[in-house]
Amino acid sequence: MNTIHASRGLAAFALAALPLAVQAQVTSSTSDSDGVVAETLNPLTVTATRAPRTADETLASVTVIDEAALRRQDPTDITDLLRGQPGVDVSSSGGFGKTSSVFMRGTGSASTVLMIDGIRLRSATAGSPSWQFLDPRQFERVEVVRGPRGSLYGADAVGGVVQLFTPQGEGEPTPRISLGGGSFDTRRASASLSGSEGGTRYHVAASRLETDGYEIVEGEGDKGYDNTSGLVRLSHGFDNGAEVGAHALRARGNTEFVGGNTDYVQQVAGLYGELPVTESWNSRLTLSEARDESEVFSSFPGFFDTRTQTARWENTVMLGAHEVIVGAEYTEDEVDSTTRYVEASRDNTAVFAQALMDFAPFILQAGLRHDDNEAFGEEVTGSLALGYELDENHTLRASFGTAFRAPTFNDLYYPNYGNPDLESEESESIELGVRAQFERGFWDLALYETDIENFITGQRSPTNIQQARIRGIELATGAEVLDWTLRAALTYTDPENRGGGNIGNRLPRRASQSLRLDIDRELGDWSLGGSFVTQNHRFDDAANEERIGGYGQLDLRAGWQFAPLWSVRLNLDNVFDKEYATAQYSESRDYLNSGRTALLSVNFGQ
Protein backbone atom coordinates (compact mmCIF):
# COMPACT_ATOMS: atom_id res chain seq x y z
CA MET A 1 0.00 0.00 0.00
CA ASN A 2 2.87 2.39 0.75
CA THR A 3 4.25 1.69 -2.70
CA ILE A 4 0.95 2.70 -4.30
CA HIS A 5 0.77 5.89 -2.26
CA ALA A 6 4.35 6.75 -3.22
CA SER A 7 3.57 6.12 -6.89
CA ARG A 8 0.54 8.36 -6.67
CA GLY A 9 2.55 11.12 -5.06
CA LEU A 10 5.24 10.92 -7.74
CA ALA A 11 2.68 10.81 -10.52
CA ALA A 12 0.72 13.71 -9.04
CA PHE A 13 3.90 15.76 -8.92
CA ALA A 14 4.58 14.95 -12.57
CA LEU A 15 1.02 15.89 -13.50
CA ALA A 16 1.29 19.21 -11.69
CA ALA A 17 4.61 19.98 -13.35
CA LEU A 18 3.57 19.07 -16.89
CA PRO A 19 1.40 22.18 -17.56
CA LEU A 20 4.34 24.36 -16.53
CA ALA A 21 6.60 22.49 -18.93
CA VAL A 22 3.97 22.93 -21.64
CA GLN A 23 3.79 26.69 -21.09
CA ALA A 24 7.58 26.96 -21.07
CA GLN A 25 7.64 25.53 -24.61
CA VAL A 26 5.43 28.27 -26.11
CA THR A 27 8.01 30.83 -27.15
CA SER A 28 10.76 28.43 -28.21
CA SER A 29 8.82 25.77 -30.14
CA THR A 30 7.40 25.65 -33.63
CA SER A 31 5.15 23.06 -35.16
CA ASP A 32 6.29 20.60 -37.81
CA SER A 33 6.09 21.78 -41.40
CA ASP A 34 3.10 19.53 -42.07
CA GLY A 35 1.27 20.71 -38.96
CA VAL A 36 1.22 17.27 -37.30
CA VAL A 37 2.15 18.52 -33.84
CA ALA A 38 -0.50 21.24 -33.78
CA GLU A 39 -3.14 18.85 -35.09
CA THR A 40 -2.31 16.21 -32.47
CA LEU A 41 -2.41 18.60 -29.54
CA ASN A 42 -5.44 20.59 -30.71
CA PRO A 43 -7.24 18.04 -32.87
CA LEU A 44 -10.40 18.49 -34.86
CA THR A 45 -13.36 16.76 -33.24
CA VAL A 46 -16.93 16.33 -34.49
CA THR A 47 -18.61 14.48 -31.61
CA ALA A 48 -18.94 17.43 -29.23
CA THR A 49 -20.92 19.65 -31.63
CA ARG A 50 -21.66 17.40 -34.67
CA ALA A 51 -19.54 19.89 -36.62
CA PRO A 52 -15.75 20.07 -37.11
CA ARG A 53 -14.22 22.09 -34.30
CA THR A 54 -10.78 22.11 -32.72
CA ALA A 55 -10.66 20.89 -29.13
CA ASP A 56 -10.45 24.42 -27.72
CA GLU A 57 -13.40 25.60 -29.86
CA THR A 58 -15.83 22.90 -28.70
CA LEU A 59 -16.47 24.50 -25.28
CA ALA A 60 -16.58 20.93 -23.97
CA SER A 61 -14.30 18.55 -22.10
CA VAL A 62 -12.88 16.45 -24.93
CA THR A 63 -10.24 13.73 -25.18
CA VAL A 64 -9.05 12.47 -28.57
CA ILE A 65 -7.06 9.25 -28.93
CA ASP A 66 -5.58 9.40 -32.42
CA GLU A 67 -4.23 6.73 -34.77
CA ALA A 68 -0.64 7.17 -33.56
CA ALA A 69 -1.66 6.53 -29.93
CA LEU A 70 -3.77 3.53 -30.95
CA ARG A 71 -0.81 1.99 -32.77
CA ARG A 72 1.61 2.71 -29.96
CA GLN A 73 -0.59 1.23 -27.25
CA ASP A 74 -1.93 -1.63 -29.42
CA PRO A 75 -4.58 -2.74 -26.86
CA THR A 76 -6.67 -5.91 -27.08
CA ASP A 77 -9.72 -4.18 -25.59
CA ILE A 78 -11.31 -0.75 -26.15
CA THR A 79 -11.68 -0.32 -22.38
CA ASP A 80 -7.87 -0.45 -22.01
CA LEU A 81 -7.79 2.85 -23.93
CA LEU A 82 -10.59 4.42 -21.90
CA ARG A 83 -9.49 3.35 -18.41
CA GLY A 84 -8.21 6.32 -16.44
CA GLN A 85 -8.92 8.92 -19.13
CA PRO A 86 -10.27 12.19 -17.67
CA GLY A 87 -13.68 11.56 -16.10
CA VAL A 88 -13.81 7.93 -17.27
CA ASP A 89 -13.96 4.85 -15.05
CA VAL A 90 -14.15 1.22 -16.16
CA SER A 91 -15.41 -1.80 -14.23
CA SER A 92 -15.06 -5.30 -15.68
CA SER A 93 -15.88 -8.90 -14.80
CA GLY A 94 -12.41 -10.05 -15.82
CA GLY A 95 -10.36 -9.56 -18.98
CA PHE A 96 -10.62 -10.84 -22.56
CA GLY A 97 -14.22 -10.31 -23.59
CA LYS A 98 -15.84 -10.25 -20.17
CA THR A 99 -18.66 -7.85 -19.32
CA SER A 100 -17.41 -4.27 -18.96
CA SER A 101 -19.09 -1.06 -17.82
CA VAL A 102 -17.93 2.46 -18.66
CA PHE A 103 -18.88 5.13 -16.12
CA MET A 104 -18.59 8.65 -17.50
CA ARG A 105 -18.43 11.35 -14.82
CA GLY A 106 -19.88 8.97 -12.24
CA THR A 107 -23.09 8.22 -14.15
CA GLY A 108 -24.23 4.67 -14.91
CA SER A 109 -22.99 2.55 -17.78
CA ALA A 110 -26.35 2.94 -19.55
CA SER A 111 -25.86 6.73 -19.36
CA THR A 112 -22.89 6.77 -21.75
CA VAL A 113 -23.61 6.71 -25.49
CA LEU A 114 -21.37 4.66 -27.81
CA MET A 115 -21.25 5.69 -31.47
CA ILE A 116 -19.41 4.02 -34.36
CA ASP A 117 -19.08 6.33 -37.37
CA GLY A 118 -22.23 8.16 -36.27
CA ILE A 119 -24.26 4.99 -35.60
CA ARG A 120 -25.31 4.24 -32.06
CA LEU A 121 -24.62 0.71 -30.75
CA ARG A 122 -26.17 -0.69 -27.58
CA SER A 123 -28.38 -3.46 -26.20
CA ALA A 124 -31.98 -2.24 -26.10
CA THR A 125 -32.76 -4.78 -23.37
CA ALA A 126 -29.81 -4.11 -21.04
CA GLY A 127 -29.27 -0.48 -22.06
CA SER A 128 -25.46 -0.60 -22.08
CA PRO A 129 -23.07 -1.16 -25.00
CA SER A 130 -21.00 -4.35 -25.11
CA TRP A 131 -17.66 -2.54 -25.08
CA GLN A 132 -15.73 -5.78 -24.56
CA PHE A 133 -16.60 -7.22 -27.99
CA LEU A 134 -15.07 -4.44 -30.12
CA ASP A 135 -11.57 -4.94 -31.56
CA PRO A 136 -9.51 -1.73 -31.26
CA ARG A 137 -7.59 -2.61 -34.45
CA GLN A 138 -10.70 -1.80 -36.50
CA PHE A 139 -10.56 1.87 -35.50
CA GLU A 140 -8.23 4.77 -36.18
CA ARG A 141 -9.59 7.35 -33.76
CA VAL A 142 -11.52 7.65 -30.50
CA GLU A 143 -13.30 10.80 -29.34
CA VAL A 144 -14.48 11.06 -25.73
CA VAL A 145 -16.84 13.93 -24.89
CA ARG A 146 -17.71 14.36 -21.23
CA GLY A 147 -20.87 16.01 -19.99
CA PRO A 148 -24.51 15.95 -21.14
CA ARG A 149 -25.19 15.74 -24.88
CA GLY A 150 -28.93 15.03 -24.80
CA SER A 151 -29.69 17.95 -27.13
CA LEU A 152 -27.54 16.30 -29.83
CA TYR A 153 -27.86 12.56 -29.25
CA GLY A 154 -31.13 12.12 -27.40
CA ALA A 155 -31.62 9.44 -24.75
CA ASP A 156 -28.82 8.28 -22.44
CA ALA A 157 -26.19 10.94 -23.22
CA VAL A 158 -26.11 11.93 -19.53
CA GLY A 159 -22.46 11.28 -18.70
CA GLY A 160 -21.12 11.77 -22.18
CA VAL A 161 -20.45 10.21 -25.58
CA VAL A 162 -17.69 7.95 -26.89
CA GLN A 163 -17.37 7.77 -30.67
CA LEU A 164 -15.15 5.29 -32.55
CA PHE A 165 -14.08 6.12 -36.11
CA THR A 166 -13.04 3.61 -38.76
CA PRO A 167 -10.51 4.47 -41.51
CA GLN A 168 -11.89 5.99 -44.72
CA GLY A 169 -8.95 5.28 -47.04
CA GLU A 170 -6.72 7.81 -48.78
CA GLY A 171 -3.98 7.77 -51.43
CA GLU A 172 -2.25 4.77 -52.96
CA PRO A 173 -3.45 1.25 -52.01
CA THR A 174 -2.01 0.56 -48.56
CA PRO A 175 -1.96 -2.97 -47.18
CA ARG A 176 -1.35 -3.79 -43.52
CA ILE A 177 -0.82 -7.19 -41.95
CA SER A 178 -0.17 -8.09 -38.32
CA LEU A 179 0.46 -11.45 -36.64
CA GLY A 180 1.02 -11.88 -32.92
CA GLY A 181 0.69 -13.99 -29.83
CA GLY A 182 1.47 -14.13 -26.16
CA SER A 183 0.31 -14.99 -22.66
CA PHE A 184 -2.65 -17.30 -22.00
CA ASP A 185 -2.05 -18.87 -25.42
CA THR A 186 -3.32 -15.72 -27.11
CA ARG A 187 -3.21 -15.60 -30.92
CA ARG A 188 -3.97 -12.50 -32.94
CA ALA A 189 -4.03 -11.65 -36.65
CA SER A 190 -5.33 -8.74 -38.72
CA ALA A 191 -5.17 -7.48 -42.30
CA SER A 192 -6.48 -4.41 -44.10
CA LEU A 193 -6.34 -2.61 -47.44
CA SER A 194 -7.21 1.05 -47.89
CA GLY A 195 -6.76 3.78 -50.46
CA SER A 196 -8.53 6.03 -52.94
CA GLU A 197 -8.89 6.33 -56.70
CA GLY A 198 -10.43 9.40 -58.30
CA GLY A 199 -13.27 10.38 -56.01
CA THR A 200 -13.66 6.91 -54.50
CA ARG A 201 -12.24 5.97 -51.11
CA TYR A 202 -12.21 2.46 -49.67
CA HIS A 203 -11.12 0.48 -46.64
CA VAL A 204 -11.57 -3.24 -45.95
CA ALA A 205 -10.26 -5.05 -42.89
CA ALA A 206 -10.51 -8.30 -40.96
CA SER A 207 -9.14 -9.45 -37.61
CA ARG A 208 -9.11 -12.53 -35.41
CA LEU A 209 -8.33 -12.93 -31.71
CA GLU A 210 -8.30 -16.20 -29.76
CA THR A 211 -7.21 -16.78 -26.18
CA ASP A 212 -7.55 -19.57 -23.61
CA GLY A 213 -7.99 -16.86 -20.98
CA TYR A 214 -7.36 -17.20 -17.26
CA GLU A 215 -9.24 -17.73 -13.98
CA ILE A 216 -11.47 -14.68 -13.73
CA VAL A 217 -12.75 -16.10 -10.42
CA GLU A 218 -10.34 -18.09 -8.28
CA GLY A 219 -10.96 -21.83 -8.51
CA GLU A 220 -13.38 -21.62 -11.46
CA GLY A 221 -10.96 -22.51 -14.30
CA ASP A 222 -9.75 -20.55 -17.31
CA LYS A 223 -12.34 -18.62 -19.30
CA GLY A 224 -11.52 -18.24 -22.98
CA TYR A 225 -12.59 -15.76 -25.63
CA ASP A 226 -12.53 -15.41 -29.41
CA ASN A 227 -13.46 -12.58 -31.74
CA THR A 228 -13.69 -12.37 -35.52
CA SER A 229 -14.28 -8.88 -36.93
CA GLY A 230 -14.76 -7.51 -40.42
CA LEU A 231 -15.08 -3.99 -41.75
CA VAL A 232 -15.99 -2.53 -45.16
CA ARG A 233 -16.16 1.19 -45.87
CA LEU A 234 -16.72 2.77 -49.31
CA SER A 235 -17.51 6.33 -50.39
CA HIS A 236 -17.52 8.42 -53.54
CA GLY A 237 -17.33 12.18 -53.91
CA PHE A 238 -18.69 14.01 -56.94
CA ASP A 239 -17.39 17.17 -58.61
CA ASN A 240 -20.29 19.24 -57.25
CA GLY A 241 -19.35 18.37 -53.64
CA ALA A 242 -21.97 15.67 -53.17
CA GLU A 243 -20.93 12.40 -51.53
CA VAL A 244 -22.47 8.97 -51.02
CA GLY A 245 -21.11 6.18 -48.88
CA ALA A 246 -21.72 2.87 -47.15
CA HIS A 247 -20.02 1.10 -44.29
CA ALA A 248 -20.51 -2.01 -42.19
CA LEU A 249 -18.74 -3.44 -39.16
CA ARG A 250 -19.44 -6.89 -37.73
CA ALA A 251 -17.87 -8.69 -34.77
CA ARG A 252 -18.84 -12.17 -33.65
CA GLY A 253 -17.44 -14.83 -31.37
CA ASN A 254 -17.76 -16.60 -28.05
CA THR A 255 -16.85 -15.71 -24.48
CA GLU A 256 -16.80 -18.03 -21.48
CA PHE A 257 -17.98 -17.02 -18.02
CA VAL A 258 -18.47 -18.79 -14.71
CA GLY A 259 -21.23 -21.31 -15.37
CA GLY A 260 -21.45 -21.11 -19.15
CA ASN A 261 -20.59 -19.24 -22.33
CA THR A 262 -22.15 -16.76 -24.74
CA ASP A 263 -22.17 -16.50 -28.54
CA TYR A 264 -22.39 -12.83 -29.51
CA VAL A 265 -22.76 -10.54 -32.53
CA GLN A 266 -22.11 -6.80 -32.66
CA GLN A 267 -22.95 -5.09 -35.93
CA VAL A 268 -23.48 -1.63 -37.41
CA ALA A 269 -24.27 -0.77 -41.03
CA GLY A 270 -25.14 2.49 -42.69
CA LEU A 271 -25.81 4.34 -45.96
CA TYR A 272 -25.50 8.08 -46.33
CA GLY A 273 -25.82 10.80 -48.92
CA GLU A 274 -24.59 14.35 -48.56
CA LEU A 275 -25.51 17.23 -50.86
CA PRO A 276 -24.43 20.89 -50.90
CA VAL A 277 -27.80 22.48 -51.69
CA THR A 278 -26.21 25.93 -51.90
CA GLU A 279 -22.81 27.37 -51.04
CA SER A 280 -23.97 27.86 -47.44
CA TRP A 281 -26.43 24.96 -47.01
CA ASN A 282 -25.39 21.32 -46.73
CA SER A 283 -27.91 18.48 -46.30
CA ARG A 284 -27.16 14.90 -45.20
CA LEU A 285 -29.41 11.85 -44.96
CA THR A 286 -28.26 8.73 -43.07
CA LEU A 287 -29.98 5.34 -42.85
CA SER A 288 -28.47 2.90 -40.38
CA GLU A 289 -28.99 -0.29 -38.45
CA ALA A 290 -27.28 -1.61 -35.30
CA ARG A 291 -27.54 -5.12 -33.85
CA ASP A 292 -26.64 -6.49 -30.43
CA GLU A 293 -27.18 -10.25 -30.30
CA SER A 294 -26.30 -12.86 -27.70
CA GLU A 295 -27.14 -16.51 -27.09
CA VAL A 296 -26.36 -17.83 -23.61
CA PHE A 297 -25.48 -21.48 -22.93
CA SER A 298 -25.82 -22.13 -19.20
CA SER A 299 -28.31 -23.51 -16.69
CA PHE A 300 -30.62 -20.71 -17.94
CA PRO A 301 -30.13 -20.81 -21.72
CA GLY A 302 -31.70 -18.30 -24.08
CA PHE A 303 -31.06 -15.57 -26.61
CA PHE A 304 -31.50 -11.79 -26.60
CA ASP A 305 -31.33 -10.07 -29.99
CA THR A 306 -31.97 -6.34 -30.33
CA ARG A 307 -32.04 -4.25 -33.49
CA THR A 308 -32.10 -0.46 -33.82
CA GLN A 309 -32.94 1.16 -37.16
CA THR A 310 -32.46 4.90 -37.59
CA ALA A 311 -33.16 7.51 -40.25
CA ARG A 312 -31.53 10.88 -39.65
CA TRP A 313 -31.81 14.04 -41.76
CA GLU A 314 -29.39 16.82 -40.85
CA ASN A 315 -28.98 20.27 -42.38
CA THR A 316 -26.06 22.62 -41.79
CA VAL A 317 -26.40 26.29 -42.72
CA MET A 318 -23.47 28.73 -42.63
CA LEU A 319 -24.35 32.31 -41.72
CA GLY A 320 -21.04 34.12 -42.01
CA ALA A 321 -19.01 33.17 -38.94
CA HIS A 322 -22.02 31.37 -37.46
CA GLU A 323 -23.34 27.86 -38.07
CA VAL A 324 -26.85 26.46 -37.55
CA ILE A 325 -27.71 22.74 -37.58
CA VAL A 326 -31.33 21.55 -37.75
CA GLY A 327 -32.73 18.11 -38.39
CA ALA A 328 -35.00 15.22 -37.54
CA GLU A 329 -34.48 11.62 -36.49
CA TYR A 330 -36.64 8.51 -36.42
CA THR A 331 -35.55 5.39 -34.49
CA GLU A 332 -37.17 2.01 -34.01
CA ASP A 333 -36.00 -0.60 -31.47
CA GLU A 334 -36.98 -4.25 -31.83
CA VAL A 335 -36.39 -7.20 -29.49
CA ASP A 336 -36.40 -10.90 -30.38
CA SER A 337 -35.81 -13.20 -27.42
CA THR A 338 -36.66 -16.49 -25.78
CA THR A 339 -37.90 -14.26 -22.95
CA ARG A 340 -41.39 -13.05 -23.89
CA TYR A 341 -41.66 -9.29 -23.40
CA VAL A 342 -45.07 -7.61 -23.15
CA GLU A 343 -43.84 -5.14 -25.78
CA ALA A 344 -41.14 -6.11 -28.29
CA SER A 345 -40.74 -2.83 -30.19
CA ARG A 346 -40.91 0.93 -29.75
CA ASP A 347 -40.24 3.97 -31.89
CA ASN A 348 -38.87 7.43 -31.18
CA THR A 349 -39.29 10.61 -33.22
CA ALA A 350 -37.07 13.62 -32.58
CA VAL A 351 -36.41 17.09 -33.94
CA PHE A 352 -33.35 19.12 -32.98
CA ALA A 353 -31.53 22.38 -33.59
CA GLN A 354 -28.14 23.77 -32.65
CA ALA A 355 -26.53 27.18 -33.11
CA LEU A 356 -22.76 27.69 -33.07
CA MET A 357 -22.15 31.45 -32.85
CA ASP A 358 -18.80 33.22 -33.05
CA PHE A 359 -18.74 36.74 -31.60
CA ALA A 360 -14.98 36.85 -31.03
CA PRO A 361 -13.71 36.91 -28.35
CA PHE A 362 -17.04 35.37 -27.22
CA ILE A 363 -18.33 31.99 -28.44
CA LEU A 364 -21.95 30.96 -27.89
CA GLN A 365 -23.41 27.50 -28.44
CA ALA A 366 -27.04 26.54 -27.86
CA GLY A 367 -29.00 23.37 -28.59
CA LEU A 368 -32.55 22.08 -28.19
CA ARG A 369 -34.11 18.68 -28.88
CA HIS A 370 -37.59 17.18 -28.53
CA ASP A 371 -38.03 13.39 -28.31
CA ASP A 372 -41.39 11.61 -28.50
CA ASN A 373 -41.07 7.95 -27.50
CA GLU A 374 -43.83 5.38 -27.88
CA ALA A 375 -42.93 3.72 -24.57
CA PHE A 376 -42.17 6.52 -22.11
CA GLY A 377 -43.50 9.74 -23.62
CA GLU A 378 -41.97 13.10 -24.45
CA GLU A 379 -38.66 14.58 -23.31
CA VAL A 380 -37.12 17.98 -24.05
CA THR A 381 -33.38 18.50 -23.58
CA GLY A 382 -31.25 21.58 -24.08
CA SER A 383 -27.77 22.99 -23.72
CA LEU A 384 -26.13 26.38 -23.48
CA ALA A 385 -22.39 27.09 -23.48
CA LEU A 386 -20.48 30.36 -23.39
CA GLY A 387 -16.79 30.71 -24.11
CA TYR A 388 -14.42 33.65 -23.77
CA GLU A 389 -10.95 33.83 -25.32
CA LEU A 390 -8.84 35.35 -22.56
CA ASP A 391 -5.90 35.62 -24.99
CA GLU A 392 -4.55 33.67 -27.96
CA ASN A 393 -3.75 30.68 -25.73
CA HIS A 394 -6.46 30.54 -23.04
CA THR A 395 -10.22 29.97 -23.37
CA LEU A 396 -12.66 30.14 -20.45
CA ARG A 397 -15.95 28.25 -20.73
CA ALA A 398 -19.20 27.75 -18.82
CA SER A 399 -22.06 25.47 -19.78
CA PHE A 400 -25.43 24.12 -18.68
CA GLY A 401 -27.12 21.05 -20.10
CA THR A 402 -29.98 18.66 -19.52
CA ALA A 403 -30.25 15.00 -20.47
CA PHE A 404 -32.27 11.87 -19.74
CA ARG A 405 -31.78 8.12 -19.52
CA ALA A 406 -34.58 6.11 -21.09
CA PRO A 407 -35.94 3.01 -19.33
CA THR A 408 -34.78 -0.13 -21.14
CA PHE A 409 -36.96 -3.00 -22.32
CA ASN A 410 -35.81 -4.91 -19.23
CA ASP A 411 -36.80 -1.98 -16.99
CA LEU A 412 -40.25 -1.74 -18.56
CA TYR A 413 -41.26 -5.19 -19.73
CA TYR A 414 -39.09 -8.02 -18.40
CA PRO A 415 -41.48 -10.74 -17.10
CA ASN A 416 -42.09 -10.57 -13.34
CA TYR A 417 -39.63 -7.68 -13.06
CA GLY A 418 -40.40 -4.78 -15.40
CA ASN A 419 -42.41 -1.71 -14.43
CA PRO A 420 -44.33 -0.17 -17.39
CA ASP A 421 -45.02 2.99 -15.35
CA LEU A 422 -41.37 3.99 -15.09
CA GLU A 423 -40.35 7.51 -16.00
CA SER A 424 -37.04 8.50 -17.53
CA GLU A 425 -34.13 9.58 -15.37
CA GLU A 426 -33.59 13.34 -15.81
CA SER A 427 -30.39 15.30 -15.20
CA GLU A 428 -29.13 18.86 -15.03
CA SER A 429 -25.42 19.64 -15.27
CA ILE A 430 -23.27 22.74 -14.94
CA GLU A 431 -19.61 22.99 -15.85
CA LEU A 432 -16.83 25.58 -15.58
CA GLY A 433 -13.57 25.06 -17.40
CA VAL A 434 -10.47 26.65 -18.85
CA ARG A 435 -8.20 25.34 -21.60
CA ALA A 436 -4.69 26.49 -22.39
CA GLN A 437 -3.64 25.64 -25.94
CA PHE A 438 -0.09 25.99 -27.25
CA GLU A 439 1.77 24.77 -30.32
CA ARG A 440 3.35 21.87 -28.46
CA GLY A 441 1.13 21.41 -25.46
CA PHE A 442 -2.17 21.98 -23.70
CA TRP A 443 -3.86 21.70 -20.35
CA ASP A 444 -7.56 21.60 -19.57
CA LEU A 445 -9.22 22.04 -16.17
CA ALA A 446 -12.94 21.38 -15.60
CA LEU A 447 -15.26 21.45 -12.57
CA TYR A 448 -18.81 20.13 -12.82
CA GLU A 449 -21.93 19.10 -10.92
CA THR A 450 -24.72 16.81 -12.16
CA ASP A 451 -28.06 16.32 -10.39
CA ILE A 452 -30.12 13.30 -11.44
CA GLU A 453 -33.76 12.77 -10.50
CA ASN A 454 -36.02 9.72 -10.94
CA PHE A 455 -33.07 7.39 -10.51
CA ILE A 456 -34.18 3.94 -11.63
CA THR A 457 -33.43 1.39 -8.94
CA GLY A 458 -34.77 -1.75 -7.32
CA GLN A 459 -33.96 -5.45 -7.13
CA ARG A 460 -37.44 -6.99 -7.32
CA SER A 461 -38.88 -4.35 -9.64
CA PRO A 462 -37.42 -1.05 -10.88
CA THR A 463 -38.91 2.16 -9.50
CA ASN A 464 -38.22 5.92 -9.73
CA ILE A 465 -37.32 6.73 -6.15
CA GLN A 466 -33.68 7.68 -5.97
CA GLN A 467 -31.68 10.78 -6.64
CA ALA A 468 -27.96 11.29 -7.20
CA ARG A 469 -25.60 14.23 -7.07
CA ILE A 470 -22.25 13.94 -8.79
CA ARG A 471 -19.47 16.47 -8.39
CA GLY A 472 -16.04 16.31 -9.87
CA ILE A 473 -12.88 17.94 -11.12
CA GLU A 474 -10.71 16.88 -14.07
CA LEU A 475 -7.27 17.96 -15.18
CA ALA A 476 -5.89 16.80 -18.52
CA THR A 477 -2.59 17.85 -20.04
CA GLY A 478 -0.20 16.84 -22.79
CA ALA A 479 2.95 17.96 -24.54
CA GLU A 480 5.38 17.15 -27.34
CA VAL A 481 8.84 17.78 -25.87
CA LEU A 482 11.76 16.95 -28.17
CA ASP A 483 11.01 13.31 -29.11
CA TRP A 484 8.78 12.71 -26.08
CA THR A 485 4.98 12.42 -26.24
CA LEU A 486 3.46 13.05 -22.81
CA ARG A 487 -0.14 12.76 -21.65
CA ALA A 488 -1.60 12.90 -18.14
CA ALA A 489 -5.07 12.89 -16.60
CA LEU A 490 -6.18 13.39 -13.00
CA THR A 491 -9.81 12.84 -11.97
CA TYR A 492 -11.70 13.32 -8.71
CA THR A 493 -15.37 12.24 -8.69
CA ASP A 494 -17.93 12.28 -5.90
CA PRO A 495 -20.88 10.17 -7.16
CA GLU A 496 -23.21 10.38 -4.16
CA ASN A 497 -26.48 8.52 -3.69
CA ARG A 498 -29.10 11.01 -2.46
CA GLY A 499 -32.17 8.80 -2.14
CA GLY A 500 -33.57 5.52 -0.82
CA GLY A 501 -31.88 3.90 2.16
CA ASN A 502 -28.32 4.67 1.06
CA ILE A 503 -28.17 8.45 1.29
CA GLY A 504 -24.60 9.71 1.34
CA ASN A 505 -23.09 6.48 -0.03
CA ARG A 506 -20.94 6.29 -3.13
CA LEU A 507 -22.63 4.81 -6.19
CA PRO A 508 -21.49 1.20 -6.77
CA ARG A 509 -18.32 0.22 -8.66
CA ARG A 510 -17.06 3.80 -9.11
CA ALA A 511 -13.62 4.88 -7.97
CA SER A 512 -13.47 8.47 -6.73
CA GLN A 513 -9.81 9.15 -7.58
CA SER A 514 -7.97 8.25 -10.75
CA LEU A 515 -4.65 9.08 -12.40
CA ARG A 516 -3.31 8.10 -15.81
CA LEU A 517 0.11 8.83 -17.35
CA ASP A 518 1.15 7.96 -20.92
CA ILE A 519 4.76 8.50 -21.98
CA ASP A 520 6.29 7.58 -25.35
CA ARG A 521 9.63 8.28 -27.04
CA GLU A 522 10.84 7.88 -30.63
CA LEU A 523 14.48 6.78 -31.00
CA GLY A 524 15.13 6.42 -34.70
CA ASP A 525 13.88 2.97 -35.70
CA TRP A 526 12.92 2.28 -32.07
CA SER A 527 9.99 3.47 -29.98
CA LEU A 528 9.58 3.05 -26.23
CA GLY A 529 6.65 3.88 -24.00
CA GLY A 530 4.53 3.13 -21.00
CA SER A 531 1.21 3.80 -19.30
CA PHE A 532 0.53 4.01 -15.60
CA VAL A 533 -3.01 3.93 -14.17
CA THR A 534 -3.88 4.09 -10.49
CA GLN A 535 -7.29 4.30 -8.81
CA ASN A 536 -8.51 4.23 -5.24
CA HIS A 537 -11.01 1.78 -3.76
CA ARG A 538 -14.63 1.31 -4.82
CA PHE A 539 -17.70 -0.49 -3.44
CA ASP A 540 -19.52 -3.32 -5.17
CA ASP A 541 -22.88 -2.57 -3.53
CA ALA A 542 -25.17 0.39 -2.87
CA ALA A 543 -24.81 -0.10 0.90
CA ASN A 544 -21.01 0.39 0.59
CA GLU A 545 -20.31 -2.77 2.60
CA GLU A 546 -18.43 -4.74 -0.07
CA ARG A 547 -15.15 -2.84 -0.50
CA ILE A 548 -12.84 -3.48 -3.47
CA GLY A 549 -9.29 -2.22 -2.95
CA GLY A 550 -7.52 0.29 -5.17
CA TYR A 551 -4.67 -0.56 -7.50
CA GLY A 552 -1.79 0.75 -9.57
CA GLN A 553 -0.84 -0.82 -12.91
CA LEU A 554 2.18 -0.19 -15.11
CA ASP A 555 2.22 -1.21 -18.79
CA LEU A 556 5.33 -1.01 -20.97
CA ARG A 557 5.70 -1.17 -24.75
CA ALA A 558 8.50 -1.18 -27.33
CA GLY A 559 8.65 -1.20 -31.12
CA TRP A 560 11.41 -1.74 -33.68
CA GLN A 561 11.23 -1.06 -37.42
CA PHE A 562 13.81 -3.59 -38.57
CA ALA A 563 13.23 -3.11 -42.32
CA PRO A 564 11.23 -0.82 -44.62
CA LEU A 565 7.50 -1.43 -43.91
CA TRP A 566 8.37 -4.14 -41.37
CA SER A 567 8.22 -3.75 -37.58
CA VAL A 568 7.95 -5.79 -34.42
CA ARG A 569 6.16 -4.69 -31.24
CA LEU A 570 6.21 -6.00 -27.68
CA ASN A 571 3.60 -5.08 -25.07
CA LEU A 572 4.08 -6.01 -21.43
CA ASP A 573 0.99 -5.20 -19.36
CA ASN A 574 0.73 -5.22 -15.57
CA VAL A 575 4.50 -5.39 -15.29
CA PHE A 576 4.51 -5.97 -11.52
CA ASP A 577 1.85 -8.71 -11.77
CA LYS A 578 -0.59 -6.89 -9.47
CA GLU A 579 -3.73 -8.83 -8.52
CA TYR A 580 -6.69 -6.47 -8.47
CA ALA A 581 -10.40 -6.27 -9.27
CA THR A 582 -13.03 -3.69 -10.17
CA ALA A 583 -16.11 -5.89 -9.59
CA GLN A 584 -17.14 -8.85 -7.44
CA TYR A 585 -18.52 -12.24 -8.45
CA SER A 586 -20.05 -12.80 -5.04
CA GLU A 587 -19.46 -11.65 -1.47
CA SER A 588 -15.69 -11.73 -0.81
CA ARG A 589 -14.99 -13.27 -4.25
CA ASP A 590 -13.63 -10.88 -6.87
CA TYR A 591 -13.63 -10.87 -10.65
CA LEU A 592 -9.86 -10.78 -11.16
CA ASN A 593 -8.09 -8.91 -13.91
CA SER A 594 -5.25 -10.66 -15.71
CA GLY A 595 -1.79 -10.65 -14.13
CA ARG A 596 1.38 -9.93 -16.07
CA THR A 597 0.63 -10.27 -19.79
CA ALA A 598 3.03 -10.22 -22.76
CA LEU A 599 2.08 -9.89 -26.43
CA LEU A 600 4.54 -9.91 -29.34
CA SER A 601 3.48 -8.96 -32.88
CA VAL A 602 5.12 -8.68 -36.30
CA ASN A 603 3.65 -6.04 -38.59
CA PHE A 604 3.85 -5.16 -42.29
CA GLY A 605 2.68 -1.86 -43.77
CA GLN A 606 2.88 1.87 -43.18
Image: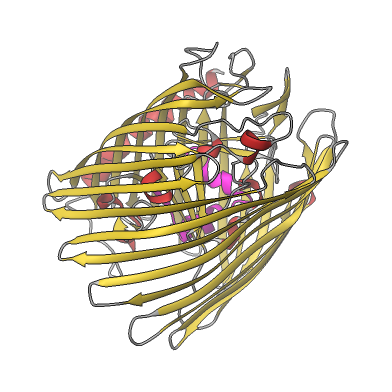
Q: Is residue 8 left or right of residue 592?
A: left
Q: Residue at x 67, y 56 (%)?
A: 600
Q: Residue at x 47, y 12 (%)?
A: 504
Boundaries of the magenta span: 63-84
Give the mark count: 0
- Who is closer to the viewer here, 149 or 342? 342
Query: Where 318 sits versus 97, above or below?
Result: below
**Which residue appears farthest toward the right when viewing the image?**
299
Q: Position of residue 389 (x, y in %)?
A: 15, 46
- Residue 78 magenta: yes
Q: Residue at x 29, y 56 (%)?
A: 54
Q: Is residue 569 left or right of residue 187?
A: left
Q: Position of residue 297 (x, y in %)?
A: 85, 44
Q: Position of residue 605 (x, y in %)?
A: 57, 73
- Who is closer to the viewer here, 424 or 93? 424
Which image quadrant is residue 431 in?
top left
Residue 178 shows in the view? no
- Who is closer to the viewer here, 482 or 295? 295
Residue 383 shows in the view? yes
Query: Where 451 sits versus 476, above or below?
Result: above
Which image quadrant is residue 91 in?
top right
Query: Where 562 sits versus 357, above or below?
Result: below
Q: Position of residue 308 (x, y in %)?
A: 59, 55
